[in-house]
Amino acid sequence: MTVTADLAKLLDRKYENMSLAELLKAPVHAMAGITEKDAELLKQAFNIKTIGDLGRNRLFRMAADLADLADNSR
């Protein structure tokens, strides 16, 4: 299955041309809308240091699943 996304809308400019493998190792603040201060708070609270850590965090995934369930039950 082919999936496309406009990474320019999701990432800070200097991270736009990275591969997905590189992006998962990039700091959380590489994502658009997340500051270095936000990233530090995620690190302190949840030990989340990279985009991959954030995407694989069980609490964030659980919250996303619950939101999806709620949205799909309408």
Image (cartoon, rainbow, N blue to C red):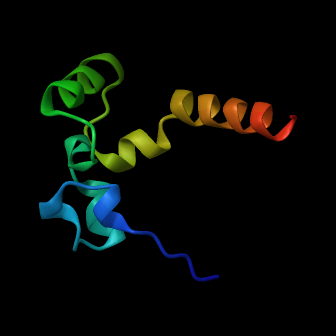
State left or right for residue 23 relative to residue 54.
left
State left or right for residue 48 relative to residue 65.
left
Residue at image position (23%, 26%) is 38
Q: Residue furthest top?
A: 45
Residue 60, compared with residue 4, is above or below; it is above
Residue at image position (24%, 20%) is 41
What number of labels is visible?
0
Residue at image position (22%, 31%) is 39
| Position of residue 29 measured from the top left corner of the image (x, y, whole percent) | 21, 41
Question: What is the quadrant of residue 64 in the picture?
Answer: top right
Question: What is the quadrant of residue 71 in the picture?
Answer: top right
Q: Residue furthest right?
A: 73
In depth, the one of 25 and 29 nearer the eye is: 29
| Position of residue 69 measured from the top left corner of the image (x, y, whole percent) | 78, 35
Q: Quadrant of the N terminus?
A: bottom right
| Position of residue 61 measured from the top left corner of the image (x, y, whole percent) | 58, 37
| Position of residue 9 measured from the top left corner of the image (x, y, whole percent) | 33, 58
In depth, the one of 61 and 16 nearer the eye is: 16
Residue 46, compared with residue 58, is above or below; it is above
Question: What is the quadrant of residue 67 in the picture?
Answer: top right
Q: Quadrant of the C terminus?
A: top right
